[in-house]
Image (spheres, rainbow, N blue to C red):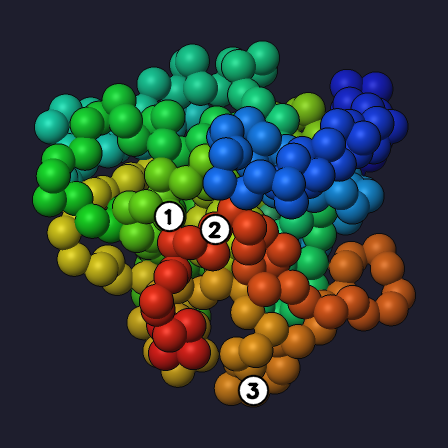
Amino acid sequence: MKNDEAITPESVYLNRRKFIKTGVTALAAAPLALSAPNLLHAAESEDKPTDYEEITSYCNFYELGSRKKDPAKNAHWLKTEPWSVVVDGEVNKPGTVPLETLLKPHTPQDRIYRMRCVETWSMVIPWQGIPLADILKRFEPTEKARYVSFETLLDPDTLKGQERPILEWPYREGLRLDEAMHPLTLIATGLYGKPLPNQNGAPLRLVVPWKYGFKSIKSIVRITLTTEQPYTSWNHHGPNEYGFYANVNPDVDHPRWSQSKERRIGEFFKRDTLMFNGYGEAVAHLYKGMDLKRYF
Ligand SMILES: Nc1nc2c(c(=O)[nH]1)N[C@H]1C(S)=C(S)[C@@H](COP(=O)(O)O)O[C@H]1N2
Ligand SMILES: [Mo]
């Protein structure tokens, strides 16, 4: 895949850094008086976006193969039309997500987020999308809703990765409701100003920038609000290795490797991993009083 003119030039994203810095200053000065837009600008990444080529060719999407280059190569296995996303469970108005409006090229907002994989690589990705909260509110979560469960398409005939029992398919992830409603939590429908490539989770995927990459489930077909903590694929696969919370935390090692450093794709030297992937000012309050070594 090659960059072309349709891609918003990198300079446009880099020019926004000044704007973002203003947000950071505001945050330091008055952390409690923050409006949501300021908080978002503060939390957005000041780092240089990773090349489009890297973002779309170095992927984790086991349904399309388990090596990093497989999802781009096998992207055509995923058929995104027709597509529908059901929202059900603890909501007053169950139904389907209005994809016609959501996937229109000009409706989504730009968000530049740092992403950190539990495998210790990271990227900076200019996403387009809309906050998950804006979607969930339309379905009116009930008073009993406490968690949100997400499911990827199940279709082993075409998604050949699902023929192998690496995980229990379909891929499933979950968030606590307050995490799901946080303004940083995004349903992404594009990157670099272009529709989401299949290998990055078309037509829509979750992005939770303060958590390890596996929380950011791709190619979603179902969102269920629940009263109990939902099943999640990686937690089921290895409960000692992949916690339900999966917050980026340099102090909690994966049992088989350290989480204290990361390699930004495109860079040579490793950098220190930041608590909550650097989004602590925006999200630490969600975990007040919790032992994050126990709830890892
Ligand atoms: N359905 C599905 N979603 C998934 C995965 C997957 O294998 N299947 N991999 C996860 C992991 S481990 C990571 S790090 C991110 C990677 O997103 P990217 O390939 O767009 O960078 O997707 C996450 N979402
Ligand atoms: Mo990951």
Q: Residues within 10 Å of mark 2 (few under 14, many from 20)?
A: some
Q: Amino acid at mark 1?
A: Glu
SS of the residue under disc 1: helix
Q: Nearer the viewer, mark 2 or mark 3?
A: 2
Residue 179: which numbered mark, if any? 1
Going by the image, does 66 lie left or right of 47?
left
Residue 283: which numbered mark, if any? 2
Q: Residues within 10 Å of mark 3 (few under 14, many from 20)?
A: few
Instruction: Name the residue rendered at 16%, 44% in the picture.
Output: 145
Going by the image, does 232 lie left or right of 20?
left
Residue 55: which numbered mark, if any? none
Sequence-wise, the earlier of marks 3 and 1 is 1
Q: Nearer the viewer, mark 2 or mark 1?
A: 2
179 or 205: which is nearer to us?
179
* Residue 272 seen in the current view: yes
Instruction: Name the residue rendered at 84%, 27% in the picture.
Output: 15
Residue 256: which numbered mark, if any? 3
- Is the residue under label 3 in contact with that under label 2 (CB below 8 Å)? no
Residue 198's spot in the image, x, y percent?
Answer: 57, 38
Residue 57's spot in the image, x, y percent?
Answer: 72, 49
SS of the residue under disc 2: helix
